[in-house]
Image (tube, rainbow, N blue to C red):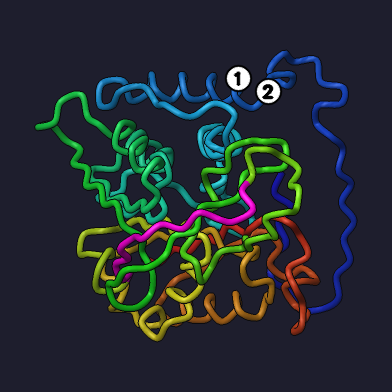
Amino acid sequence: QLHWTAPFSGERFSLVFFTPAMTLAEDADDHMNEDELATKLADAHSLSVSTILKPLQFRQESTDALVIMELLDSESCAYELKPNADIQGFTLEDHACALDVGAHIGVFSRLALSKGCKHIIAYEPEPSNFELLTNNLEKRNPSSLPTIELHSEAVAHGPSQLRKLVRARNQNDGTQNTWRHSLEEYSQYNDVDKTKDLPSESQRNVLERLDVTSTPFFGGALVEGVTLVKLDCEGAEIDILLSDESARTESWLDTTDLVIEWSFTKERRVSVMHRAIRNLKEAGFTVYYEGQGSWWDTDPGALWPYPNDLVIFAHRK
């Protein structure tokens, strides 16, 4: 549920009650485990793009299911906003070209294609994710539209170079963590003593590190013709959006719409996010996010109080 708070002047208090949705639910879907629900959503989505792409594949007992549930549930897609009195809404429909940074296994790219996108450029540095990305964006007819470009590279601020990618530690229940891999300077995970017992046998005490090539966002991944940008690059978006280039209208080329996963798991100071938002506004974007004007958004010294990251939407004409 979105509890939207628009910017305003004055004092505000809010009280929100949360009731677990599954407690009294009678619908059978509510009792599905994550893999079963993700399979149902993936199958329905696959039918919608069946003339373009092969069925969506994902790994069972992994966080792949969470990505699918976040994006492919039409009633609660995390990357779209329905318009209301305070916001004009945000849609992925009918873009000329989408740049998918942190493409994972291709769910966002496939969703954009289902919404009429004509061209996809996707970046994903982690090898097992990239393998699934390649399968999930393989067209039935290679010579037909839309066109798709895949890059097995990271995207970050700064020059193209060789960097270390840290594989995320699996979850405590043993679920394979496929969506928190990040460049080492942004990783939320640390090595632990080899003698320490971890909650799951699938967890590694010493994290696995891979050599990957990174390409710059401005002057590299972002090219002319891109109208929609998705940034979900596990912390790398912070330096991209804090850069001088981010505040320049011309840096964004043809981009009209941005959807960003802001990594509060890497940087909890809300003031840092505000600096990035000021850059986007200076570049001509109108910015939306859940909780605008709330206590954590207006307290100058606030730290992000929640365990999840925040989705930021930006649009310019």
Q: Secondary structure at mark 2?
A: loop
Q: What residue type is disc 2 on?
A: Asn
Judging depth in this view, the residue of 203 and 292 nearest the camera is 203
Judging depth in this view, the residue of 196 and 170 nearest the camera is 196
Quadrant in which the N terminus is drawn: top right
The residue that mark 1 highlights is 36
Q: As drawn, which residue projects farthest toward the front?
A: 195
User: Which residue is rendered at x = 28% and y = 26% of the image?
Assistant: 53
Q: Is residue 68 left or right of residue 272?
A: left
Q: Please say whether residue 45 is one of the residues in the magenta stretch.
A: no
Q: Position of residue 241 (x, y in %)?
A: 46, 75
The residue that mark 2 highlights is 33
Magenta stretch, residue numbers: 204-217
Q: Determine crowd level at label 1: few under 14, some 14-19, many 20+ residues with C-alpha closer than 10 A.
A: some
**Residue 187 quadrant:** bottom right
**Residue 245 quadrant:** bottom left
Q: Please say whether residue 208 is one of the residues in the magenta stretch.
A: yes
User: Which residue is rendered at x = 64% and y = 55% of the image?
Assistant: 85
User: Which residue is rendered at x = 54% and y = 75% of the image?
Assistant: 277
Q: What residue type is disc 1 on?
A: Glu
Q: Is residue 238 left or right of residue 296?
A: left
